[in-house]
Image (spheres, helix red, strand yellow):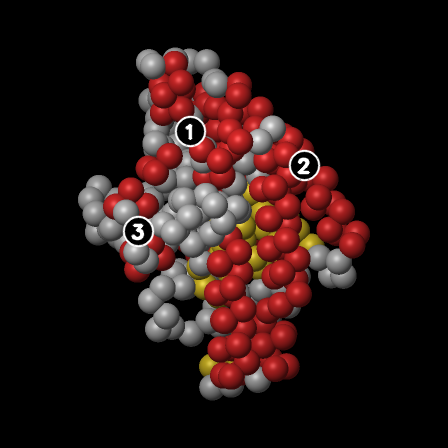
């Protein structure tokens, strides 16, 4: 299945830099010598419960049934009936489930998840109700300071340089009312610009290895098609898909530029657009009867739900 290929892609990314025995000790914590932490940034596709602890609306939370009913057997804050993508990557990388940044009661040596359902790359997207990408970067700066206090400068630098930084963001920006105030080219430039600024910010803090998803086929989501057409339709909405394609083209160019501009920057780029298009339009190939609303999105705030994978 494509989702397994996606996970395998990131697993190889981890293993390329080592993740297994022998052990080393960071402060009082002993870990595999080539231990690799996972830090997660994004929206509801990656949120594992941060929005449970912020002042927001129920539309931006997944702390009630039927969320979580298949794997955890209770709602965890994930916009899924089971686990979400970072959970699988952590499992395959032999890490524990990466916990949400809130509440702040855990160690950070395995990484942490900053993702907030409904968040965008732009501060204005659902402002005041979510933790946007630049706010998530601020939290990461706080984590570095806490790690330095516990591990010391040298060990913190090593941990952050070996870590992988998983990012998915942008869909909420393109469904925001603010998007209608600009040309597609200008708005995409703003979204991708904020995303690449955050990547550079993570790099300045010490990050080197990144896993980045591009935008899915937004115009093919069933609820988007129903919203625009007023009824269920087999045809995708080109306006939304065009925005996603433009975003992906611009992002690809900017990532190649970053690779040349900033020292040590490495990234794995997942083609989420083609995967989501295939998944929605050929559901039987993946053991489903039909492509439905629950196929990969950015939360119910936008009228569609994140993919639920057991």
Identify the mark nearer the N-term, 1 or 2. 2
User: Going from the N terminus, do you reach mark 3 or mark 2 first?
Assistant: 3
Q: Nearer the viewer, residue 65 or 58?
A: 58
**Coordinates of residue 62 in the picture (x, y in percent):** 28, 47
Q: Local crowd at mark 1 within 10 Å, few (<14), some, or many (≥20)?
A: some
Q: Residue at x 46, y 23 (%)?
A: 220
- Which mark identifies residue 286? 1
Q: How many other residues sit within 10 Å of disc 2, few (<14), some (14-19) or many (≥20)?
A: some
Residue 287 location (% of width, % of height)? 37, 28
Identity of the residue drawn at 36% across and 64% down: 102
Residue under the point 49% across and 58% down: 135
Residue 250 is labelled as 2
Mark 3 to mark 2: distance in Å?
A: 32 Å
From the image, state whether disc 3 or disc 1 is nearer to you: 3
Left or right side of 221 for 270: right
Marks 3 and 2 in Cβ contact (< 8 Å): no
Can residue 62 be seen at all in this image of the molecule? no
Residue identified by numbered label 3? 56
Label 3 – label 1 distance at C-alpha? 35 Å
Residue extending farthest front: 181
Q: Measured from the top left, where is residue 3 in percent x and y?
A: 48, 39
Helix, strand or loop at label 3? It is loop
- Against 269, is 237 above or below? above
Front residue of this view, candidates 93 and 115: 115
User: Which residue does the image show at 49% across and 71% down from the upper left?
Assistant: 143
């Amino acid at each position: 299945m494509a989702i397994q290929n996606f996970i395998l892609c990131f697993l190889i990314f981890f293993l390329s830099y080592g993740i297994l025995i022998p052990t080393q000790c960071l402060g009082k914590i002993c870990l595999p010598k080539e231990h690799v932490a996972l830090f997660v940034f994004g929206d509801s596709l990656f949120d594992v419960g941060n929005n449970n602890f912020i002042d927001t609306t129920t539309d931006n939370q997944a702390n009630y049934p039927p969320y979580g009913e298949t794997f955890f057997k209770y709602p965890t804050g994930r916009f899924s009936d089971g686990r979400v993508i970072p959970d699988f990557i952590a499992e395959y990388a032999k890490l524990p489930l990466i916990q949400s940044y809130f509440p702040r009661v855990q160690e950070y040596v395995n990484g942490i998840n900053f993702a907030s359902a409904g968040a965008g790359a732009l501060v204005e997207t659902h402002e005041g109700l979510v933790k946007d990408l630049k706010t998530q970067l601020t939290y990461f700066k706080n984590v570095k300071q806490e790690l330095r206090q516990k591990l010391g400068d040298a060990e913190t630098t090593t941990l952050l340089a070996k870590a992988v930084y998983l990012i998915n963001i942008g869909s909420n920006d393109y469904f925001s009312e603010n998007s209608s105030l600009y040309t597609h080219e200008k708005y995409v430039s703003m979204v991708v610009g904020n995303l690449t600024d955050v990547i550079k910010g993570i790099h300045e803090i010490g990050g080197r290895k990144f896993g980045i998803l591009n935008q899915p086929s937004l115009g093919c989501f069933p609820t988007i098609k129903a919203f625009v057409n007023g009824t269920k339709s087999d045809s995708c909405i080109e306006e939304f898909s065009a925005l996603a394609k433009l975003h992906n083209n611009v992002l690809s160019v900017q990532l190649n530029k970053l690779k040349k501009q900033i020292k040590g920057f490495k990234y794995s780029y997942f083609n989420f657009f083609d995967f989501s298009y295939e998944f929605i339009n050929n559901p039987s190939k993946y053991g489903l009867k039909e492509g439905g609303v629950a196929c990969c999105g950015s939360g119910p705030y936008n009228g569609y739900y994140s993919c639920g994978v057991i």
